[in-house]
Amino acid sequence: LTSSCIKHFDELKENNKIKEILSFFIARLATLVVDMIIMYLGVNILFLNDKFVKIISQITVIVANYVLSKLFVFKKSKS
């Protein structure tokens, strides 16, 4: 009984790690899209300086990465 319980908990831990890795990559892809949209709008549509827009974009991406990581990727389990 104990070895099967341990094996079951090991499988749950492994599934949580895979879920965490996938959440991490999805969150980073989302912020990549945000970065590309900000750059496109700022440079091609609004004709702003590309370096200025990149600074604004990076600040936005850093904040978004932090928030997404806190809320979705590295959330603490209830157990």
Image (cartoon, helix red, strand yellow):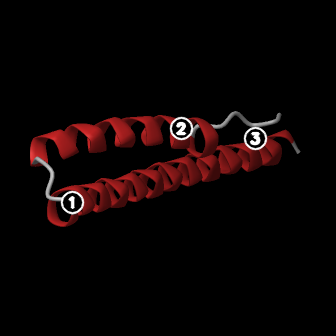
Hey, what amino acid is under mark 1?
A: Leu
Q: Mark 3 points at which residue?
A: 6
**Separation of disc 3 and disc 1 at Cα?**
58 Å
In the drawing, does residue 79 fall left or right of residue 18? right
| Circle number at residue 46 | 1
Nearer-the-camera pick, 23 or 61: 61
SS state under label 1 = loop
Q: Report which quarter residue 61 is drawn in.
A: top left
- Which residue ends up furthest to the right in the rendered image? 1
Image point 22% across, 37% down: which residue? Answer: 55
Using a 10 Å C-alpha cutoff, classify the residue at mark 1 as few (fewer than 14 neighbours), some (14 to 19) or many (20 or more).
few
Image point 62% across, 53% down: which residue? Answer: 15
Hey, what amino acid is under mark 2?
A: Val
Mark with earlier residue (3, 1): 3
Percent x, y of residue 47: 14, 58
Using a 10 Å C-alpha cutoff, classify the residue at mark 3 as few (fewer than 14 neighbours), some (14 to 19) or many (20 or more).
few
Percent x, y of residue 46: 21, 60
**Separation of disc 2 and disc 3 at Cα?**
34 Å
Q: How many labels does the image show?
A: 3
Mark with earlier residue (1, 2): 1
Q: Mark 2 points at which residue?
A: 67
In the drawing, does residue 79 fall left or right of residue 29? right
Nearer-the-camera pick, 64 or 69: 64
Image point 44% across, 41% down: which residue? Answer: 65
Mark with earlier residue (2, 3): 3
Placement of the N terminus among the 4 image quadrants: top right
Image point 42% across, 58% down: which residue? Answer: 30
Placement of the C terminus among the 4 image quadrants: top right
In the drawing, does residue 5 fall left or right of residue 57? right
Q: Report which quarter residue 75 is drawn in.
A: top right
Hey, what amino acid is under mark 3?
A: Ile
